[in-house]
Image (cartoon, rainbow, N blue to C red):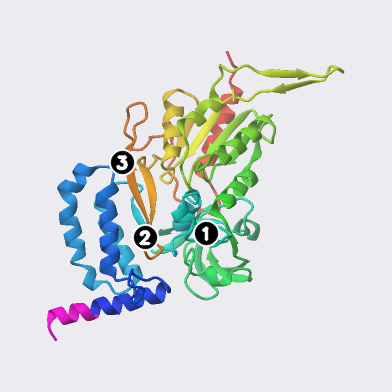
Amino acid sequence: MTNRRIHRHLVLAFAVLFSLFYPGVRTASAAAPLLPSDLFAEITGLVEAHFYDPAQIKRSFPAIRARYRAKLSRTDSPQTFSSLVNAMLGELGASHTYYLTPEDMEYYYLAAVFSKMPEIGALFSDKGVLYPTVGIFTERVKDRVHVVSVLAGGAAEKAGILKGDEIFSVNGGPYTPVAALRPLVGTDAVFEVRREGESAPFQVMMKPVLVNPKEEMLEAQKSSTRVIEKAGRRIGYVHMYSYAGEGYHRELINSLVWGQLKDADALIIDLRYGLGGAWPYYLNIFNQNIPVLEMIDREGNRNRVDSQWRKPAVYLVNGFTRSGKELLAFGAQKYGLATVIGERTPGMSLGGRLFPLSNKDLLFLAVQGCRIDGVNLEGVGVKPDIEVPFDVPYCSGQDAQLEKAVEHLSTRLQKPTS
């Protein structure tokens, strides 16, 4: 068999695999499944047309594209195709640039953020963007899946899952964030969890649910809001799992002005994990040059309404505090608005846009550069005022960075004010 015939057979075999994974997806002919070479050409075409740095594309992308196109014949599944494309995109060295399939959690996170775009909304049913979840963020560390954050109020928190736990299996099979949960929605699934090193796993029952990720993160933000008592002082805490939308910031303001955090002596805003999307003007909550309003009724009852936070504050950050959240950390640090505690942020500050592909996958692509006060944070990030390294795996729910923030604010509150 000639090399040309071998290549043709490989391409057709891969196309069949694609049609099995993505039924109903067709090329313009409506007869043949979408070929990987066609999808590759579609992705590279979008990169060439829209990537934020055209000079870089002209200079280096033709050689990168040719090298990865040559590897197409060696891909034998959608998973290896996805890995191939993401490896190619990774050579651009840009944040907000990767290929997503319906097996990726971020496929749903970003689709929900961009769902008002007709071409994105059309990918989903009338019920909108829904994905299977038990309320955890996970990270693969040394080929083991660990829980790095537990969404407050979710199924995992209610079941006793802790930060640092290893998810060993679900219903006897390997755990993946989407594929493993999708067939288990609404059922009591058995998760095997390991909490300490090489100890035997134990079983936890959780029921995956279908939710919109934007709504899930907002509800988790509300559930996370609490007051921590320390040395006779009240330290407010809220986890901003996402800042990709005005609703998250409005909820924060409501909790500061009217809610649980109104009478706190200090404040911790947790920016770790989840999505960015914040705008620099969100730092206006720390602006003290705005007057306090006092309402007095006819009986003389007084109600003080202060829209600003005028007490000590901390931003918690780490290597997963990205995009717009990094802008907040930068601004808070530069203008002395809040103390930044944790680990250096990743330097992912480009502006991204979501492109739907012919097979209903998504390409997230950096389409804009970004400067804040003239500073480029891309690839640099924000170094915290107080660095606190934290190794999450098997930490049994302990949080060294949060503990340091509480200690720092408690110490500040003990000092006499000028």
Image check: 253 left or right of 344?
right
Q: Is residue 230 visible?
A: no
Q: In the figure, residue 8 lies in which quadrant? A: bottom left
Residue 251 higher or lower than 188, as above or below:
above
Q: How many other residues sit within 10 Å of disc 2, few (<14), some (14-19) or many (≥20)?
A: some
Q: Residue furthest top?
A: 418
Q: Secondary structure at mark 3?
A: loop
- In the displayed structure, 145 sits above or below 237; it is below
**Left or right placement of residue 325 versus residue 406 in this view:** left
Outermost residue to the left = 2
Residue 23 point in image, percent of width and height:
43, 74
Which residue is drawn at the image coordinates 41% and 63% (left, top)?
360
Pointer 1: what residue?
165
Seen in the picture, residue 348 relative to 361 is either above or below; the reply is above
Residue position for label 2: 357
Q: Which residues are magenta?
A: 1-9
